Image (cartoon, rainbow, N blue to C red):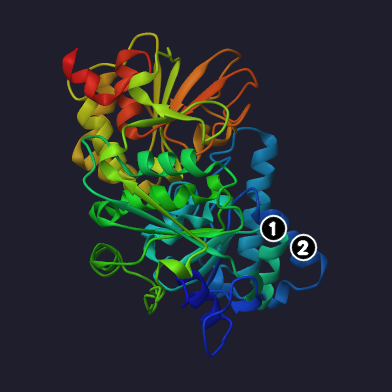
Amino acid sequence: MPTIAEKILGKKAEKEKAADPGEIVECEVDYVMVNDITGVPAFDVLKEHGLEDWIKREKVVVIPDHYVPNKDVASAEQAKALRNYVRRHGLDHYYEVGRGGVCHQVMIEDGFAAPGRLIIGADSHTCTYGALGAFSTGVGSTDAAAAMATGRLWFRVPETQKFVINGTLKRYVTGKDIILHIIGDIGVSGSLYRSQEFYGTAIEYLCLSDRITISNMAIEAGADAGIIPADGKVFEFLNEQIRVRGKYKAVYADGNDEDYEEVFEYDAAEIVPTVAKPFTPDNITPASELDVPIDQAYLGSCTNGRIEDLRVAAEILDGRTVNPDVRMIVVPASDKVFQQAIEEGSIQTFLKAGAFVCGATCGACLGGYMGLLAAGERCVSTTNRNFIGRMGHKDSEVYLASPAVVAASAVKGQIIDPMELEYL
């Protein structure tokens, strides 16, 4: 019986039944997303092959976020080239600096992502939209260009793994801890070219923001997609909190456990605030077992820059101050999140605590600019990757953690379990 990925790809390929694992299908794509790094190469391909008049404008979403506001002349020229392409082709779905934010957050909060949709993005973390029951995956700029011109793209239908997390989560244990726990178990190649599906009472309990974090990091285990079946929380978000674009239809798996390539089961009560040590996301350890001084604490990114993440960190920082030996950087994932955090008072809490707050951007996540690390420096970060040189110098270190761990560590000056703050 088919999984969610098999059913969505079968439907988008206009097959009478679900697609089979390993099958090559050509599918109609709902949206194609590019950012300031990947967009210009994609448009250059269209120009080179004389396909600019073919662009399916309604499907193309352009969201600069990696190097904006521009850090140097090269990034300024790149952003200008992207902006010129957008104007030249009359693309409506364009989000200028100050009117958007990190691409994956914007795709969700502005109604492009929805259950049952097939979305590609020229960014590896496009798998994020699986949290809403979509099949979304990252592609290269050339594939993005092909889909822009034809509205279609070929896919190899992935095998599917099932992850079941049942039970009650402990205090300060979040979606970030769940996905780090899973990646630590199966490894960074444990889901290579697979689709992941997540189930269980712990998943059902999670807010949408935490689910987005889980789907966002599916790629860190090598997965093409990380899908969570849509439920009432998703429908409330789409139909009441935002204005979803167009119609959609949720898709659910029909299969039993034997229909999945593998089934992994976890007890939520055994998951603790978790940290991924350098230099891979599967190098995990409980935060309580670390004694690592830090130079920087980073809160933001497409993984954990949503309003719920900022609320958790603000609650911990309220009435406390960032350690004098630590610089804390807070970057909301979108301009809407930034505005909401201002209205709720979280931004003022961060400022009083001694944190630096910046407008919506990818910021330090990719080591592009702002918040880079010098040789020998350590950062505890809510981002998704901690490879060598990811956030600056090749001799720096990045530790991945939840917003709660990052905020608590910023206060202490070293990585700690948030529960430890209550006894200080």
Give yes or no for contact between labels 1 and 2 (Cβ–Cβ under 8 Å). Answer: yes
Look at label 1 and name its amino acid: Ser
Q: For numbered disc 2, what is the local secondary structure? A: helix
Residue 280 relative to residue 311: left or right:
right
User: Is residue 130 placed above or below 6 in the rendered structure?
Assistant: above
Q: Is residue 82 visible?
A: yes
- Which quarter of the picture shows residue 151? bottom right
What label does residue 237 carry, if any?
none
Q: Position of residue 16 (x, y in %)?
A: 53, 90
What label does residue 141 carry, if any?
1
Of residues 408 and 103, the one nearer the viewer is 408
Mark toward the viewer: 1 or 2: 1
Q: Position of residue 96 (x, y in %)?
A: 50, 52
- Disc 1 versus disc 2: distance between alpha carbons? 8 Å
Q: Residue at x 63, y 21 (%)?
A: 393
Q: Residue at x 47, y 53 (%)?
A: 104
Residue 295 relative to residue 372: left or right:
left
Q: Mark 2: few, some, or many residues within 10 Å (few <14, many ≥20)?
A: some
Look at label 2 and name its amino acid: Val
Q: Position of residue 349 (x, y in %)?
A: 23, 27
Q: Is residue 355 visible?
A: no
What label does residue 45 carry, if any?
2
- Which quarter of the picture shows residue 245? bottom left
